[in-house]
Image (tube, coloured by chain):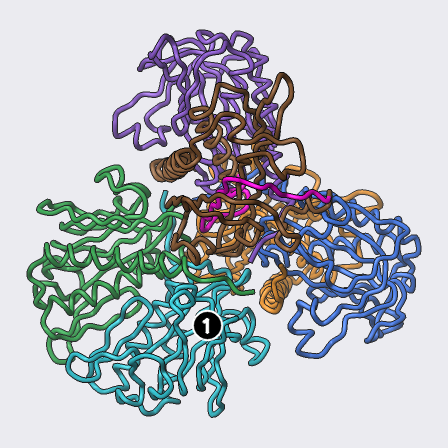
Chain colours: A orange, B blue, C purple, D brown, E green, F cyan
Amino acid sequence: MKGKYIKGRVIAYDGSQLSPLWCFKNFDLQGDCVLAFRGPCDVKDEFMVDLEDQKKGSTVAADDMLHFIVEVFQSDLISTVLLQRLLIVTVMEVIKKFGEELGLRREGDSIYARLDGEVWGKLSVSIATVSPLSGLIHLGLNVSTEGTPVRTAGLSEIGVSRLDDFADETLRRFVDEFQGVQFDAHKVKPVV
Amino acid sequence: MKGKYIKGRVIAYDGSQLSPLWCFKNFDLQGDCVLAFRGPCDVKDEFMVDLEDQKKGSTVAADDMLHFIVEVFQSDLISTVLLQRLLIVTVMEVIKKFGEELGLRREGDSIYARLDGEVWGKLSVSIATVSPLSGLIHLGLNVSTEGTPVRTAGLSEIGVSRLDDFADETLRRFVDEFQGVQFDAHKVKPVV
Amino acid sequence: MKGKYIKGRVIAYDGSQLSPLWCFKNFDLQGDCVLAFRGPCDVKDEFMVDLEDQKKGSTVAADDMLHFIVEVFQSDLISTVLLQRLLIVTVMEVIKKFGEELGLRREGDSIYARLDGEVWGKLSVSIATVSPLSGLIHLGLNVSTEGTPVRTAGLSEIGVSRLDDFADETLRRFVDEFQGVQFDAHKVKPVV
Amino acid sequence: MKGKYIKGRVIAYDGSQLSPLWCFKNFDLQGDCVLAFRGPCDVKDEFMVDLEDQKKGSTVAADDMLHFIVEVFQSDLISTVLLQRLLIVTVMEVIKKFGEELGLRREGDSIYARLDGEVWGKLSVSIATVSPLSGLIHLGLNVSTEGTPVRTAGLSEIGVSRLDDFADETLRRFVDEFQGVQFDAHKVKPVV
Amino acid sequence: MKGKYIKGRVIAYDGSQLSPLWCFKNFDLQGDCVLAFRGPCDVKDEFMVDLEDQKKGSTVAADDMLHFIVEVFQSDLISTVLLQRLLIVTVMEVIKKFGEELGLRREGDSIYARLDGEVWGKLSVSIATVSPLSGLIHLGLNVSTEGTPVRTAGLSEIGVSRLDDFADETLRRFVDEFQGVQFDAHKVKPVV
Amino acid sequence: MKGKYIKGRVIAYDGSQLSPLWCFKNFDLQGDCVLAFRGPCDVKDEFMVDLEDQKKGSTVAADDMLHFIVEVFQSDLISTVLLQRLLIVTVMEVIKKFGEELGLRREGDSIYARLDGEVWGKLSVSIATVSPLSGLIHLGLNVSTEGTPVRTAGLSEIGVSRLDDFADETLRRFVDEFQGVQFDAHKVKPVV
C-alpha cells in the first residue's frame, strides 16, 4: 500500500472522489493506496452512497476537513468496512500522540471527542463501499467546526495543530498497519 | 454472531480448538460466533499454525488465560486478520473501562500493558487463520503471569479483577461491533 | 433473512425495483431479505435485464401480480439463480397447500398450471441477477390473467384466493428454507 | 456437467467417496459431474462430515441404496447446499413420474414418503460439503428398507421398480437443471 | 468456451463492444466465449477503460483490424489479465505458423514485430477489464498500418495474408488452450 | 512478488515442497514469491497431486533439475493454472535468449525441445494446485536427461550452460511479468 499527502493544496470533496482509480487518475497512486488532502466537504446527492444518511436527509458538509481516501483491490465490502475500522482506530492513536490528553470515543466508524465535561462532538464522517474492482473508504476529519450541520469537534479545537505532520504520521501508521495485516496473513498455516 | 462465555469451567487450550466448527461441536454455537473460556494455554507443536513462532522456536504457554475463539464463515484470511484487529481493539476498550488508568499499547495483534515506568509486559497472544469453510481467531489474555515464557502482563496485575464480567462485557461489545460492521455493509450503494 | 409483506398497498413493478438496497431504502428491510407486494407489472426497456427476452422482443406485463423481491448479500450469480429455483419450488409447495388439487409444472424458473386437460398456462415471470454487492431476484405471480401478453394462468383461477395469507405463508416458508440452507452450511466439516 | 450411471455393479458407500476428484480418479468423470451407483451404505466415523449427526450419535446406514455423488468446481458451501436442494427436488419430480401417486414431502434435504395414512418414512440421506477445490454432495435413496437405523421408506416400496431407468432419468434431468441454471446465469445484465 | 468468427462483415470497434453479454446479445454466443471480426478501430472517450491511455491522451485507432473479444464468467481481474496474456501468446504462436520467419516480441499485452533491422512496429492493442459478471478482453491486430497513431506493424506486412484462416486457427487454438487450462484445473488434488 | 535463487546447494524435490508457506518456512520468502533451486526430482506417491499421472502410473523423476516453486495468495485454481502458463512462456523466452537457435514447442504446461530432425524431447514437468490459502506451482526443467523415465531433453543438451545466470534471468523476468499483470489490473475501469 502506498500513501501520499497532497500538501498545501485545497481539494473540495463532493463524493465523486469515492470512485475506482480516482487516486491513480489524478495522483498517480497505483494499486492499494491511501491519499490524504485538505479541503471543504459537501457531498452531492448523486454521489451520496450512504442510504441511511439519504433516508434521514442528512447532509455531509464542513468548511475544512482533512480527508483520507483509501482504495484496496480484491476486497469485498465486509473486508473494506473492517479496514475502515482499522483506519479509524489508527487515526485515534495518532490523535492521542498529537493532541492534548482528552477523551476520544469510537462508535462504529465515528470518532467523538470530549469538548467540555460530558459534551462530546463528532469529529469525523466516514463511509466504506465497493466498486466492481476495489474497496473504497472515505474518512473526513473536521479541522475547524465551521459549516458542519451538527454539533461537531475539530482537530484544531482538540489540540492537533500541526496538521501536515498529523497527516503524514497517520498515513505512515496506516500503511504500516495494512502491511502488518498482510504479513500476518502470509505466515500462518490453514487448518482443516 | 452469537457470543457465549463458558463460565466456571477450566478448559485447557492446546491449539486443537482452532478448528472449523469446534464451537458448534462442543458448545452448540452455530454460524458466526465468539466463545470465551478460562484455562491454561500450551500450544502443541502439531497445532501451531504460526510459522513465524515455529521458526523462532517460540512457545505459546501460560498457566491461566482468558481465551476467545472466533469463527466467521465465508471470510478470507485478510478479512479474518482485520476482524482479529477489531477484537484486539475491543478488548483494549473494555480493559480501559474495567482496569485502572494505565498504559495500553497495541502492536499489530499484540497488547502491551505498562507495568512500571517504561517497563511494558505482553498481555496477549493471538493468531488468525482460515479453514476451507471459515476464518478462525484465537486470542488469549494472561490472567496471571505464571508460566509465561517471556516478560508478560496479566489482567489481574493491571486491575481487571471481575473476570467473568469482563468476559461478558467483551463478548457483548464484540458481537455489537461485528453487527455494526454488517449493518454498515448493508446500507451503501456500490460505486462504478 | 427477513421477510415483509406490504399489505393493502398497490405498488407497480417496472423493473427499477430490482436494484441493490431497494428494500432497505423503501421499506427498511436490511441485510438478506424478501419483500412481497401486489400490483401491476410492466417492465420498462431500460430496466429489462433479461437479454433473452430483450432479443425476442418479449414484454413482461400483467395487470395484477403478487411480487417477490429477494436480495442476498455476498452471493454470486450461480448461487442467486439456485436460490431463485428454491423460491420457485417453495411457492409451488405453498400453492399446493392453498390451491385446488391441480397440476403444476416447473421448467427452470417458470411455473405452469394445468388449466383444462392438456392446456397449461404460465403462472409466473422471474429473473435473477447480481449487483456488485448482492444477488437479486424478482418473481411475479399472476393474480388474474388480465393484461398478460401470452397464455397465462392466475392464482385466483387455480383456487388460491386468500392472497394475503398466501403471501405471508410463502414468505415464512422461504425464510425458513433460507435459514435451513445456512444451518446446513454451518454444521459440516470440509473434506480434503 | 456430465452424468454417469455405474450400472450393474455394487459399490459400497462408506463416506470416503465424498472427496475431491473421486469421480475422476475412479470413473474418468472430469469437471462438474454427477455419478450414480447402487450399493449398501455405512458411513465410517472418520468420513462422517455431518457434525450434527455425529453429535447425536446418528448412524447413516442401509443395505441397499441408490447413491448420487455430485462434484461442482468453484462452488462455495452455500451454493453447494442450494444445488443439493435442487437435486432433492429433481429426484422428487422423477419419483412422481415413476412411482405411484403417493405423498412425498421435503424437509430441507430430506425426502419423506407417505407409507400408510399419516405414517411417513424417510426415503433419503444427504449431505453437502466443500473441499478446497469443489462443492460435493452425497444423496442416498433407500431401495429397500433393510438395515436402516430409523423408520424409513424405500423406492421399491413406493412403486419405483425400474431402478436403472430411474437413475438414468434422474441424471438426465439433473444435468438439464444444472445447465438451465448456467444458461440463466449467462443471459442477464448486472444491475447497479 | 465457444469461438465464432464473423466472416465477411465489417464491424467497427468503438469500445462499446467491451461490455457484458455483447457477444450473446448480438451473435448468440452464450457463456465463456471468444468472438473474432474485422473492421476499423476508433475507441470513443466514453468507452475508454484504460486510464493510463486516457491520462496520456493516447488514441486507440486503426483503419483495419482483426478484433478478438473474449468474455469469461466468474473471472476476477487478475485472472482475466492472465488469460489475456495467454491469448497474446496464442496469437504469436499462430502468427509464426502463418507468417514469414520474422521476429516477434511480447511486452506484457503488446506484440511487436520486427520490420527492418532493429526497427520494430507495434502490431496489437489490447485491454482486459471486468464487469460485475465477467472478465472481458479486447485484442486488436492491425491488418494494414493505415490510420494508426504510432509506428505500427500490420499482419499483411509481416506475411499473414489468409486472414480468415488465421482468425479461424487462432480461435481454435485459444479455445483449446482455455479447455486445457480447465482440464488441468480439474485433475489435481488440493494440498494443505 | 519476490524471487530468490538458492545458489550452489542441492535440494531434492520429492513433492513435499509444494505446500503452503514452504518458501517462507525454509527460505524466509514471504507473500507472493518464486523460488529456484537445483537438485534431483523424485515425487513420492503421497505428494503426487496430479491424479492423471497417478492413474497412468507415471513417475515424475530426474537426476538433475532446475526447480521453480511459485506461491501466490488469494489465487484460485484457474488463475494459478493461467499463471503457470505464463511461467512456462517466460521460461521459453529466456531459453531462446540463452540457448542455441533450436525448436521449442509448448503443449499446455509442457515444453518440448527439438533434439534432432523430427525427434522432440520433453524438457519440463509441471503442476499447479491450490491450498486453502494460496495457489502453488512447481516447474522442473531437466538439466541433464539422466534418470528421466521417458524420452526427454535437458537444458545442457540444448545449449543452456550458464545455469545460475539462466535461473536468475528467469526469476527476474517472471517477477516482472507478474508485476506487469498486477499493474494492468490496477489501471482499468470496470464496465457495466
Is residue D100 something one can see in this rendering?
yes
Q: Quadrant of residue B91?
A: bottom right
For label 1, count other residues whose C-alpha is less than 10 Å away and answer few (under 14), some (14-19) or many (20+): many
Looking at the picture, tell me which residue is in the foreground, D9 or B55: D9
> Which residue is painted at 47% across and 78% down in the image?
F35
Quadrant of the drawing holding the C terminus of chain F: top left
> Which residue is painted at 52% across and 16% down in the image?
C96
Describe residue B94's horizontal placement relative to residue A11 as left or right. Answer: right
> Residue B124 at x, y = what percent?
78, 64
Q: Secondary structure at mark 1?
A: strand
Queried whether the magenta region covers residue F159, the answer comes back as no
Q: Quadrant of residue F188?
A: bottom left
> Residue C156 at x, y = what percent?
47, 7
D158 over B52 or under it: above or below? above
Looking at the picture, tell me which residue is in the foreground, D120 or E55: D120
> Residue C76 at x, y = what percent?
47, 42
> Which residue is painted at 21% across and 40% down in the image?
E27
> Residue D15 at x, y = what percent?
57, 51
Looking at the picture, tell me which residue is in the foreground, C185 or E84: C185
Q: Chain of mark 1?
A: F
A51 over E128 or under it: above or below? above
Queried whether the magenta region covers residue D59, the answer comes back as yes
> Which residue is painted at 58% across and 33% down in the image?
D110
Is residue A49 something one can see in this rendering?
no
In magenta, the rendered stretch is D57-81
Number of marks drawn: 1
Q: Amino acid at mark 1?
A: Val
Identify the residue under disc 1.
F70
